[in-house]
Amino acid sequence: MWTRLSIFFCFLFSLSALPLSAQDPQLSQNLANPLLNSPAFAGLQDQNKVYLTHRNQWPNQSANYQYSAAALEVSLGKINSGLGLLISSDKQFSSLQTTSLALQYAYHANLNESTLLSMGLQGSLIFRSLDYSRLTYGDQLSSFLVNGTLGSTLDPTASLFSNNVNYGDLGAGLLLNHSTYWLGASVHHINRPNQSLLENSDDLIAPKYALQGGLSLAISEGKSIKPVIYLKNQGNFAQVDLGTYVQLDPLVLGFWFRGLPLNKTTADSFSSRESLIGLIGIQNNRYSFGYSYDFTVSGLGIGSGGAHELSFSYVLNWDFGQRKSYQRYRQSFACPRF
């Protein structure tokens, strides 16, 4: 009973906040499934790969957040292109679920033997649904106090909700990759789709703009340090992921900060110091596996349970023809795999 009530009140709060502060899922292992970041990554490594990602955020809260994604990356080396196919699903408050299907295309232009420019486009279909059986209305509470049962609701606001809403979404990205650095820019929700579950109401998703970059500093064979930065802005929401990866083949360690380092609060008076993140992973030429934990430093505190995130990738044996001039470049791909 009380679990349903907590879900209901959290859901009402989310409805009031969504038009002002709705944000895309926040992942800690931003490069473990790079197709989630930008369509420009599709086929960039001249490999065919599958990716799996799962995130459980605030597991100690009744209104926790879970996100899962799978992706297939296909390299079309003979035409200097790549394809990406993604499916993802997230569940909030155990009642609100969003599923996304996306198709990506990227074209790769070799600027020289060590530098490549990738340009990508993405089209998505989004399916958003609400499970009303997990919501409790005021008249049901009155019934519970009198009869000990919730019963059905006659609240007129219940009829204002739609069971589901579907919409299309567009995104694009650019990525410049050198043997020792990378720079990227992307934008999602270019068409500002309406995700509202309320009839005759608009809840337009603000475009998300992102910049990312990093360096690959070799120490010795199989050992390197890769400092990275990832900046995101969506509506009134801004965030920076700042940290570094330490590669000690086959082991990878990572540590970074998420928030706005120079600000104590955001424009909406929320704490801008969100979390400290640690990563451990293993990788070789065939697969990679990573685990990360977000240590919450915002107002939610340690009691939220932070966030656990798992990632896995595997290189397939498919061969659609690799570009011969691209082989030297592939060996010096600068981005981390997590």
Image (cartoon, rainbow, N blue to C red):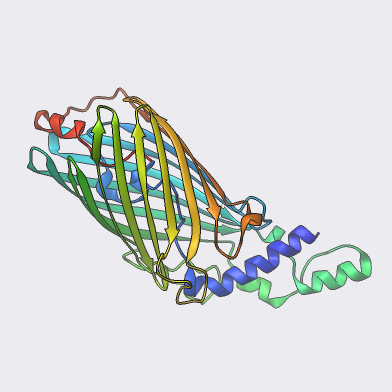
In the picture provided, is 241 more to the left or to the right than 1? Answer: left
In the picture provided, is 82 more to the left or to the right than 30? Answer: left
Tell me which corner region of the image, top left, top right, bottom left or bottom right, holds residue 258. Answer: bottom left
Q: Identify whether 269 is placed above or below 76.
A: below
Q: Residue 79: x percent and y percent?
A: 13, 37
> What is the total number of numbered labels drawn onto the structure image?
0
Tell me which corner region of the image, top left, top right, bottom left or bottom right, holds residue 225. Answer: top left
Q: Identify whether 14 is placed above or below 57.
A: below
**Which quarter of the rendering shows the C terminus?**
top left
Q: Residue 87: x percent and y percent?
A: 43, 45
Q: Identify whether 70 is placed above or below 121.
A: above
Q: Residue 202: x percent and y percent?
A: 47, 75
Q: Residue 130: x percent and y percent?
A: 60, 60
Instruction: Determine the residue located farthest toward the front in the rendered image.
Output: 219
Taking the spot 27% from the left edge, 45% from the top edge, the residue there is 41
Looking at this view, is 222 or 282 the one in front? 222
**Which quarter of the rendering shows the N terminus?**
bottom right
**Residue 94 appears in the picture as rendered:** no
**Residue 211 appears in the picture as rendered:** yes
Taking the spot 28% from the left edge, 49% from the top edge, the residue there is 39
Looking at this view, is 243 or 77 the one in front? 243
Taking the spot 55% from the left edge, 59% from the top edge, the residue there is 297
